[in-house]
Structures are given as C-alpha cells and as structure tokens.
C-alpha cells in the first residue's frame, strides 16, 4: 500500500513533529488491505478480541470481547467473521449501540501469552438472516453474525505487552452480566485501579473525508504499574513510549482530540471503560524518565466511564512484565540528576572516554567507558546494552549495541566487550580499530530488553561464546542478592572462554564450563540440562540462534512455562559457511545480490528498497516478508513453524540454496 493510502494527515503531521517520518514511511509498508496468510490461524485461535468504536456523540470507546476459539476468524484475506453464539455476551457494552450509527471499527487480535498482535481496521455489518438487531438486547445478540470488511491490516511488534495466560471456564459463557456502574468523575476505588494498571487498550478516531463517519483504530499500551498517572478525579497522564513510529493513536488525537480506553482489572474480575477528550503534550520536562526519553505524553480528560463485572471464570495468570517496559528513575538517582543531565547532551547522547582497554582473547577486547567530566552515569539493570555510534569503513555512521558486563551497582563507568567478527557487518571491526585509550565515543543511554524477572525461583544461566556479556552482569546481581542459581558457559575452545576466571570467581562450584573443540572436549548437553532442571526454574540465555531454539523446544517438551524461558540472540552475525545469495523481488522487478557477510535487510537498504524493521535480531517479526519461491534458512526466534513456511525475517535469515524470491 502506498504511503498516502497508509497514513492520514494527522499521522503525517505527528510523524513529522516527532522527526520520525522516514521511519514511519518504512514501517508503514506493513499496512495492507489484506490479512496475511500466517495471521489467519492466529486470529482464529484467540479467545479475546479488542474492538474500538465511536458512539453517536462522537466519543471513542474500547471494548474487550471474550469467546471460544473461532468466535472471530478470517473467512478470507479480506474479511473477518464475528460469531456471537460463541461469545460471552455483554449487552451493555457501548459497542453494540455504536456500530448502528458508525460502522467503522478498529480490531486488535492480541495474544498476551506470546506478545503477538494483529490489527485490522474496517467496516462491520450484521449478516445474520434475522437482520441487524434494532435494540441490541441480549436475546437478539445471542446468535448474530457480523462481518468486518478489511480496509487495513497489519502486525505490530511485541513491545510493552505483559505476558498473561487467559483461560475461560466453560460455564462463564452462560452467565448474564450485570448492568454496569456509570459516572463522570473517578471514585477513589477507580483511581486505584487505574494507578495499579500495567496495561490498557485505546480507541482513537479520525473523521472520513465525507466527515459523516469516523475511521477507528484499536491499540495497546503497557508499562509497569503506575505508568498511568491520575491527575485529579477526571484527568489521566499517559506517557508515549518509542514505538513503530507510525503514530496511529497520536495522529488520530491530533486531528480528532478524543479517545477511549479500557482497563482490565485482572485481579478483581471487572473492566473499566473510559472516554473523553484527549490532548498531546510535547517536549515535557521529564526528570524521572517517565516517557523513556521521548518527553511525549497525552492526557485523557474523562467525560464518561462505566465499570462492568465479568465472570470469575475468566482468569488471567500473570507470567512476566515486558522487558521493554521503561523504569522511572528512583529517589537515589534523582538526587544526582544534575550530574546525570551533564552527561547527556541536548540530543540525548553521551560523549564517553575510553579509560581502559584489555585484550581478553584473540578476538575479544574489553573497553571501560567513562564520562569525560567524571560524572555519574545513568543507572542500568543487569542485561542492559549500550548503543554505540560507529563509523564504518565506507564512512557510514551507524549504531551498534553491546551488552554492559560491569555491575549494575557501578555508576562511574560502563564496561563492554566487543568480539571482532571478520564475517560481520563491519561494526565490531571498526570499533576494534577506533577505540583506543582516551578516544571519545558517542553513545546513547543504556537500554534493557533482557532483564532479570524479580522472583525467588532458581535461575539457570546459559551463555554461548560472546553471549556471556549480558549473562555476566546478571551473574553479578544474583551473587549480590545471594540468589539460587547455576551458570553454564560454553564456547568452541578453552581460549574462547574469555571470561572463565571472572565467572569462576563469582560463581565457584555453581559454574560449569564446556567446549566443543580442542584436547578436552566437553559439550553442553542441553537435553540433559533442561530435563533435569525443575520447571519452576527460570532460564536466561544468550548465544547463537541454534542454541536458543533448542532450549525453547526442550523447555516446551518438558512442560516449562513459556514465561520461564528468557533469551537474547546475537542477531545478524554471519556464519562461516554463508555464501552469496540472489534475491528476486517480484513487485519491484529487481534482483539484488547479498554478500556472505551481509543480511538480506542490509542489502535491500543499500539498494534503497525500504522494508519495515525494528530489532534487527530476528525477535520482533517486523521485517517478516512473504517468500514466493526458494527455501529460507530461518535464523529468527519469532516466526512459528506455520509462518516459516510462508515468510522470512530478512534481518537475520538467509536462503538454504542460491536464490529466494520475495514479495517486495
């Protein structure tokens, strides 16, 4: 779909105001007028659906529907079917009245347990033989079929979604829901619900060209409890974290300043729907890092709310918080906020000086980076990485990410390890050449997408090669907390166990070392390790895709909860046997060559062929592209087996043969 069909003027304006128009243009290519083949079975297996609508007075409302798998399904790539006979009916939900006056709806199929979501915008109509229900009473809703004609369809990344397993007891579908409580001003009890929430769904809208209908979007927002601030008894302050840069919600608010949200009270069996006026706040002072660096917020001034009890048989089992959730600065950190500000410039960067360089192995160097003024650096948590600006041999300036291996208690410097990848993309090679003592390098504040989940369970740490770097920081924290843990560190040879001494000193008898080559080969037996570890344990691993995939499969085989398996991959590191491949692009009628040390994504970008992407590690699925012919060599950790038969994540994967044809 073209840029102009994908975005309306409000979205374009907000993208420009945020200086993210180019990223939005790239990522907007995921928007289609058809549902992806791989998304069809995903939609059909859901037992929860978020629907956004607009009432007769123009207020947006968010609704959450529950049903048995199949209550919502794609009948073809251009249509969804909603079957109320398979649903828990809430006759008082505003949705049923709203669609009588405005047929445009926003749909969000979201699976909290896997952090997957798929959005559809379109028109809804009742296609039952009985015809459209006139009064929308419970009896008339019981056996209705609604068809949603697809206008826009696209996947979203997994950021900020807290993992929960939703299970609905069969008897729940027979319960008659009570009339909701309604009001205008928030009660202390509702304020508490909002303040403790870690997730909500938002409805926003824009007027059609004819201005007699509203186009509607449904979206998800998440963070740690407290990320929604309640200001008085009618006003909410909500941070806008860095997302996919398309700004569907804020773009709508920009041109139509109203919104509706729904909060599921997971622990007290109720949903809270709120609707009112919305307003975007730009460039706000944010000393506590509430917005995670964007300094962007929006307010919701509540005009109406309604609270509805839902059956106690609708159960959510909390698994873990999203590793992307930003943390606000703590009191001790605020005490030195003046020093932190001096380390970060107006562009959000820090100029750090290389204060130490140590050679750990033939290919690995450790670098200690300090602020030039010797000030306190921004705090980080174990597992965080540091984005570093590097100039490649061709003069191109790019960002590369390296895990911080020093203690999270140390705020005078960051320590990183860089392995020189001869077959890599050039970043590690350039940094090995450029980072010398006293050299200054530009970095961004630490980011964490691989943090330790706070709990008292036993922890199994697994590190493969240079994957030891985030694991080492985690090890330091577990030792400091006197936690129950074990660590398994593997590499090709003894010489490549570059941090063996550090691990041994920290973990003692809890450390286990393995090599696959050399005189004394001792391979890590993952099958034995997972089989003999208690399923209540949490495993944290960083290393090659093959190792991560094997552990995930073994954990599933031995009935480990998915939320107990945490991982971070190397990303797009080339393999020694990689060869040049030919990529044919059907839509643009082009053929490009991908070098052995290049990713398909990088080769496409070099030819100015825009493809949506985010993580560049094969973890978010943003770059998943349809394969028309050829067999893909999958190296991602996002696509499932069904999706891999149809798509490929071009940021990390390659071809098993010499050619691939992509739908680009």
Image (cartoon, rainbow, N blue to C red):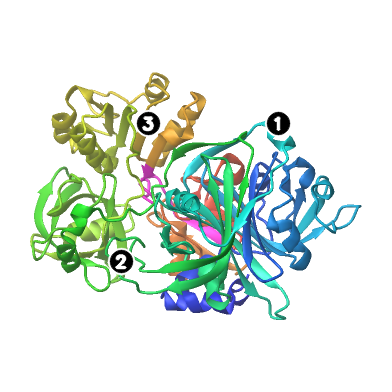
Residue at 68 percent of width and 64 percent of height: 33
Give the side of residue 541 with respect to residue 379, left or right.
right
Query: According to the image, label 1 marks what residue?
Result: 171
| 440 lies above or below 50 | below
Magenta stretch: helix, strand or loop mostly: loop
Q: Quadrant of the C terminus?
A: bottom right
Q: Which residues are magenta?
A: 568-584
Q: Quadrant of the N terminus?
A: bottom right
Q: Which of these two is toward me, 445 or 32?
A: 445
Which quadrant would residue 641 be assigned to in this image? Answer: top right
Give the side of residue 574 with respect to residue 261, left or right.
left
Q: Position of residue 413 (x, y in %)?
A: 14, 54
Indicate the secondary structure of the residue bearing disc 1. Answer: helix
Query: According to the image, label 2 marks what residue?
Result: 286
**Is residue 578 found inside the magenta-colored segment of the image?**
yes
Q: Position of residue 481 (x, y in %)?
A: 21, 33
From mark 3 to mark 2, how far is it between C-alphas?
Answer: 34 Å
């Amino acid at each position: 779909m073209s840029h102009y069909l994908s975005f309306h003027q409000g979205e374009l304006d907000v993208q420009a105001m945020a200086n993210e128009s180019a990223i939005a243009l790239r990522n907007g290519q995921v928007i289609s007028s058809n549902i992806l083949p791989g998304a069809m079975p995903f939609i059909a297996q859901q037992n929860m659906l978020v629907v956004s609508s607009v009432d007769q007075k123009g207020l947006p409302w968010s609704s959450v529907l529950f049903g048995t798998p199949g209550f919502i399904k794609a009948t073809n790539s251009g249509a969804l079917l909603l079957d109320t006979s398979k649903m828990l009916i809430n006759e008082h939900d505003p949705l049923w009245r709203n669609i009588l006056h405005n047929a445009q709806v926003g749909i969000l199929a979201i699976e909290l347990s896997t952090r997957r979501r798929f959005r559809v915008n379109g028109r809804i109509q009742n296609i039952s033989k009985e015809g459209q229900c006139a009064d929308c009473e419970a009896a008339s809703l019981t056996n209705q079929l609604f068809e949603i004609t697809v206008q826009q369809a696209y996947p979203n990344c997994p950021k900020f979604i807290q993992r929960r397993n939703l299970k609905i007891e069969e008897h729940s579908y027979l319960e008659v829901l009570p009339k909701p409580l309604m009001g205008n001003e928030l009660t202390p009890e509702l304020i508490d619900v909002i303040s403790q929430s870690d997730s909500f769904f938002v409805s926003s809208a824009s007027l059609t060209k004819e201005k007699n209908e509203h186009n509607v979007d449904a979206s998800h927002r998440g963070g740690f409890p407290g990320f929604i601030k309640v200001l008085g008894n009618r006003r909410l302050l909500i941070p806008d974290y860095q997302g996919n840069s398309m700004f569907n919600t804020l773009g709508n608010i920009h041109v139509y300043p109203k919104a509706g949200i729904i909060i599921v009270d997971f622990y007290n069996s109720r949903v809270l729907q709120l609707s009112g006026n919305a307003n975007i706040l730009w460039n706000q002072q944010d000393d506590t890092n509430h917005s995670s660096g964007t300094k962007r917020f929006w307010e919701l001034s509540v005009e109406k709310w309604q609270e509805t009890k839902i059956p106690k048989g609708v159960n959510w089992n909390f698994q873990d918080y999203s590793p992307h959730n930003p943390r606000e600065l703590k009191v001790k950190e605020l005490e030195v906020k003046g020093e932190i500000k001096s380390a970060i410039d107006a562009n959000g960067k820090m100029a750090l000086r290389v204060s130490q360089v140590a050679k750990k192995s033939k290919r690995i160097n450790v670098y200690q980076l300090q602020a030039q003024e010797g000030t306190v650096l921004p705090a980080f948590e174990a597992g965080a990485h540091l984005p570093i600006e590097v100039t490649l041999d061709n003069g191109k300036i790019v960002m590369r990410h390296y895990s911080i291996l020093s203690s999270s208690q140390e705020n005078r410097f960051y320590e990183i390890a860089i392995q020189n990848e001869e077959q890599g993309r050039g970043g590690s090679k350039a940094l090995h050449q450029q980072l010398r003592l006293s050299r200054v390098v530009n970095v961004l504040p630490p980011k964490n997408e691989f943090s330790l989940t706070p709990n008292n369970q036993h922890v199994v740490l697994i590190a493969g090669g240079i994957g030891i770097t985030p694991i080492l920081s985690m090890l330091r924290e577990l030792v400091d907390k006197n936690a129950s843990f074990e660590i398994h560190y593997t590499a090709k040879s003894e010489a490549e166990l570059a941090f063996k001494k550090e691990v041994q000193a920290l973990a003692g008898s809890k450390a286990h070392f393995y090599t696959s080559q050399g005189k004394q080969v001792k391979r890590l037996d993952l099958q034995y390790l997972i089989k003999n570890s208690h399923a209540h344990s949490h495993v944290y691993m960083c290393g090659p895709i093959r190792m991560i995939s094997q552990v995930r499969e073994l954990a599933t085989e031995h009935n480990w909860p998915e939320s107990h398996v945490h991982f971070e991959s190397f990303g797009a590191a080339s393999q020694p046997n990689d060869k040049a491949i030919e990529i044919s692009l059907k839509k643009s009628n082009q053929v490009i060559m991908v070098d052995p040390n290049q990713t398909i994504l990088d080769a496409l970008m070099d030819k100015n062929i825009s493809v949506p992407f985010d993580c560049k590690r094969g973890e978010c699925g943003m770059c998943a592209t349809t394969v028309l012919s050829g067999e893909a060599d999958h190296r991602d950790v996002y696509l499932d087996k069904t999706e891999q038969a149809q798509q490929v994540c071009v940021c990390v994967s390659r071809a098993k043969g010499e050619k691939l044809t992509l739908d680009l």
